[in-house]
Structure formats: C-alpha cells, structure tokens
Image (cartoon, helix red, strand yellow):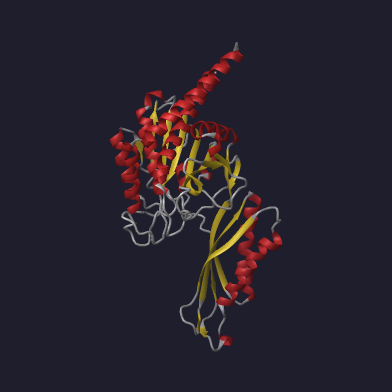
Amino acid sequence: MEFFNWINLFMIFSLFSLSISTNFLEEAKNGDVFDWMVKIRRKIHENPELGYEEFKTSEVIRTELGKLGIPYRHDQVAVTAVIAFIGTQKPPFLALRADMDALALQEKVEWKHKSKVPGKMHACGHDAHVAMLLGAAKILKEHEKEIQGTVVLVFQPAEEGGGGAKKIVESGALENVSAIFGLHVTPRFSIGEVASRPGLVYARSGFFEATISGKGGHAAFPQNSIDPVLAACNVVISLQHLISREADPLDTQVVSIGSFQGGTAYNVIPDSVSIGGTFRAFSKESFLLLRQRIEQVITGQALVHRCNSTVNFFDEEKPFYPATVNDGELHKHFQKVAGNFLGINKVNDIPRPSMGAEDFSFYQEVVPGYFFLLGMQDPSQDRLASGHSPYYKVNEDALPYGAALHASLATSYLLKLQQELEG
C-alpha cells in the first residue's frame, strides 16, 4: 500500500509540475506581463547603479511589489536589498534570487534606452534578472492560494565584487529557508534552453591590489632613482610562476593582473606603481596558499629591487567568494522541471567547472542552492556580446522563460517539500 501511495504522489507531482510550468510560460508570454517586464527592465537599464548604491532600483522593485500586494522587508537588509514573501507565510520556505547592480562601464550600444548615467551600465544582465524575478512574483501572486508554503524573493545588491549575498546571509534573511535557486542570462545558449551541472560550477575568487614604492627621478639618470616600474614588472612575471611552477597542473588556478598604473610622463621614473588583479582556485586549500604566496612574491620582489610594498586583499570591501557548488538533489529537481517545461533536449549539461565566480555561493554555504544559465541567443541573429562588454545587449524575448522557470521551480519544489513533511 505504501508503494502505491508513493507512486500516486509521484504521478501527482509530475502532472502538477508539467501543468503549472506550461501555464506559467503562457502567462509570462502574455502581452501584458511581457510588456510589463520589458518596461521595468528598460527603466532599470536607463538608470544603472553600482553595488550598494542601488537605491532607485530598490525603489522600483518596492513600488512594483506594493502594486502587486506582496509584503516585503528592506530596512537594514544589505543596504538596498529587498526581501519579499508570497504564499502561506509559513514553512516550508523556498528562495529565488536576482542580483541588481550594474558595472562601471560606458555603454556603447546606441538605442533608445541607453544608460543615462555616464560611466555606468548594466553589462551583465542584472536588469533582466530583476525584471524576471518581478515577473515570477506577478505570476506567483496570481496563484498564491496554490502555493504549498512560502516563496522568498531575494533582490540582492552588489554581486559584482561586493559580496552582497554575504550581507544577505548575515542579515538572517535565509533563516528557515530550505533551498534557493538563482539564474544568469547568457548568449552561450539559445532562447528556450538552459544549462547547468551538479557539484562544482564556479571557482573561489579574490581580488588584490599592491603599491610598490621606490624613488622617482629623471629617466635619463636611473642610477639616481629606485625604479618601482621595474620592480612591478618583475612582480607580474613572478606571479605567473606561481601557476606554472608551483601549482599542480591538475589543480586549476589563475592569477591575472588587470590593472597596472604608474607615472604619466615618458621621461620621469615615478615614485610608485600600483597593480591590481584577481586570483582563483577551486579548492579552499589551494586558494589560501595562493593568497599567501601572492603576498610573499610581491613583498619579496619589491625588496629585491630596493622598493617597499603594501598589499591589500580587500577583506571587507570585496570579500573572497567561495566556490559555487550546486546541490545534487536540486540538480535532479531542476532537470525534471526544466525538462517538462522546455523539453529534455533543451536542458544542457555544462561539461566542466569555470574559473568565473558568483557570490550566489555564499547562499550555498548555509542552505542547499542551485544556479543555472538561461539562454537568450536568437540563432537567426548575430552573436550577442558576452557580459562585461560595453556592447552587451539582452534579448528581451528570454524574459518570459526566466520568470516562468523561477515560478515553476519554486512551486513544484515547495509541493515536494510539503509531501515529504506529510509523508
């Protein structure tokens, strides 16, 4: 008898998942809902804000949630964050996350809704992420009586290096949450496709900056100076030796210098040079060792060249990101829901982890989490630019898929949790 009860529950869950997924996509594609999401996305795109400065973006989100009659918290939650609730307001709790910060880039895409803020741009799709989560909120509110628990909507600041997720966790916003899902738009896959993998997805990541100080002087008489440029050049080269001669070739690690700033005159040796970069590794042990060796190399090479040095790892401003690791059980749930929703041939496997980083990992340190990619490429059009490009564009036809997937993953997982509690 127990076997047949389990089979019946499984069939009910499968049919429910399939029906609500189909209905949610139809609702998300509805002209009114789609146009509403597009309008919100464009409004946010025109007014980009950097990490922990998303005050207008937060206000837009709160205004729309208020119109929908969805309760939320925002005071003293990660500066600009908004945490909203849909459902019974009782356990079980399932969270959905959207990041909302922009990048310090000058937009070079000429269109009607180009960034109105010089030097700032939504060049990683976070404006679309916000619009899709609001779209999911609108759909879920229409089906609130059917939700077997509570969906927690997390609108998060400062993903781009600021570790906004860490502050969300520290605020206690995820207490009692059973799991969390997040997504990111990508031109790597076509519209109507998704991709992810179980286990390790993205690497641990950190930033550093070093100032190497010498003694400036006329470039014609280097013997009278202590050249920090030469010292900094040797630092950059020596840092690469950490990867080629100290790291296990099978233990992937990266050190990249993205900033090198010195003097401004061609015939003057500057007093100091500053360099900045990122370092990444998959394992915690390798990551911490790499951090230690970076500091030792910078300090040692500066001394060899008679210079002084300081090294800053931005422990507070840019906290180290943990590795992004997808929960195995949530992977099975994602494949089932997305397969029913899109067709199993549209659910792609990511073959190997990436050295990219994502602060969604802070959530995964305290609750089971799952992060996936949402395709937005139109195969009939030119390839869209990748993220962090001044030519970045979002294909807005992807918005309904993200909104519906959010809603489908949440409602079906809450149903699954509820069945387990009653089981």
Q: Nearer the viewer, residue 380 or 29?
A: 380
Quarter holding residue 133? top left
- Residue at 58% x, 53% y: name it: 355
Q: Does 30 appear above or below 305?
A: above
Q: Nearer the viewer, residue 106 or 396?
A: 396
What percent of the width, then of the height, locates residue 117? 33, 59
What percent of the width, then of the height, locates residue 48? 36, 54
- Residue at 56% x, 79% y: name it: 227
Which residue ends up furthest to the top in the rendered image?
1
Quarter holding residue 231? bottom right
Name the image quarter holding the C terminus. top right
Q: Does 355 appear above or below 136?
A: below
Q: How many marks?
A: 0
- Residue at 59% x, 87% y: name it: 223
Residue 414 seen from this side: no
Q: Nearer the viewer, residue 112 or 48?
A: 112
What percent of the width, then of the height, locates residue 349? 59, 42
Q: In screen coordinates, is 76 left or right of 262?
A: left
Residue 280 seen from this side: yes
Q: In screen coordinates, is 351 left or right of 416?
A: right
Which residue ends up furthest to the bottom in the rendered image?
220
Name the image quarter holding the N terminus. top right
What percent of the width, then of the height, locates residue 283? 64, 49
Which residue ends up furthest to the front in the rendered image?
380
